[in-house]
Image: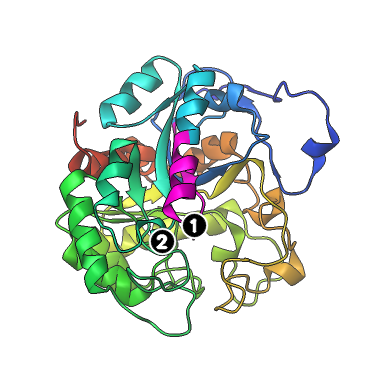
Amino acid sequence: MTRPPLTASPLPHDPLHERPNRGFHPLIEGEQPYVFVDGCMQIWPDADLPYAHRHGCDVYAVTALSVQVDVGRALSDLMYWHAVVREHPNLRIAYTVEDIVQAKAAGQAGLLLASQDGEFIGAAPERVEAFQRLGLRMLIPAYNRDNLLCGGVLEQTDTGLSGLGRAVVAECDRVGVLLDLSHVSRRSSLEINEASANPTVFSHANPKGLVDNARNVDDEQIRAVASKGGVIGTVNWGPLVFKQGMTARPTLADYLDHVDYLADLLGTTENIGIGTDFSLGSYPRHDHDKHGPHYKTVMTDMNEHVTTYWRAPERFVAGFECYPQILDVYDGLRGRGYSEDDIRGIAGGNFMRVFASVWPGAGV
């Protein structure tokens, strides 16, 4: 397959662009062979949004709401993205799968509005419908710490889904908000998946069978999500690929080992996706996760051997630290014997199938 050329982003020189935590991505020229859905990422105020449709990603599942905020702040956050698409005609909000298809045909990128936390819901499950009507399409009920809905993955105790949380799951099912289990506790992930009438996803997590990190997921969790047609979005964020005993930065090959693990465990590629956790723009610099400073660490030994900057390019696996290197991911999958249909599904087709099953409106 002919590789399209890469070009530098046309951003002007600015010391801000040299910050080690800047999410800087070159541009890809030409049409891409697949619909690439990134199951989790962030966009910051200095992002190069006029060029976001040219990085090789067709759908950005953007963290649209700040975590652990009240409903007023969450509403303001969500409405910000409506202003973004008004100002940037190269972007559109993905309300349906048909929106994604149309955006790619028009040379646009889709924004899938997602929340990595459900604290804004409080004790009012009816807020789910209000946010869904404003474009919210994916929800993680808890971000790392316990809340009223369920347990967080970085807590020392493994608490499960509350009665209120079950009502929120039912409301998500009713109005068409996809449940993402990435930052909830192990027990909560299993109970949410069982309680939901729809498929669920881990938008950005890797198999714990390869890397025993608090944020990764074990075989039982993987099989549970796959059994209902859900997807595990493999993530190239280094700490979730950094094996015990490593002393150097993980590589693209190490990342692809996680795809192999899932394919071998499940006997299919139909439940595998990609969730990079990339940033467009400068990730706020900090030395630890302010949302979980006293909880289980997710950093492993990568701080000592690679870098402490949470979103530096070096924080991602070597060979997949920017969006255009998705082309190298495709080549790596071909080199491991995956078919074009397999790669099409991993790139985004599997997520699209789940979206069509859960969201209201047009399907694939």
Residue at position x 26%, y 56% in the image: 200
The answer to whether the residues at label 2 and label 1 have Cβ atoms under 8 Å apart is yes
| 50 over 81 or under it: above or below | above
Pick whichever, 24 or 272, lies toward us: 24
Q: Amino acid at mark 1?
A: Val
Secondary structure under tag 1 reads loop
Q: Is residue 70 magenta?
A: yes
Q: Disc 1 designates what residue? A: 69
In this rendering, does residue 275 appear at all? Answer: no
Residue identifier under label 2:
119
Q: Estimate how packed mark 2 is, as few (under 14), some (14 to 19) or many (20 or more) residues with alpha carbons within 10 Å.
A: many
Residue at 73 percent across and 63 percent down: it is 308
Q: Residue at x 42, y 52 (%)?
A: 71
- Relative side of 209 to 180, left or right: right
Q: Position of residue 77 (x, y in %)?
A: 49, 42
> In this image, 349 relative to 112: left or right?
left
Q: Quick one: 13 or 364, which is closer to the camera?
A: 13
Residue 276 badge: none
Q: Is residue 184 above or below residue 355?
A: below
- What's the magenta region? 59-79
Tell me if mark 1 has few (under 14), some (14-19) or many (20+) residues whose alpha carbon lies within 10 angstroms of its own.
some
Q: Amino acid at mark 2?
A: Glu
Residue 160, image x, y percentages:
30, 77
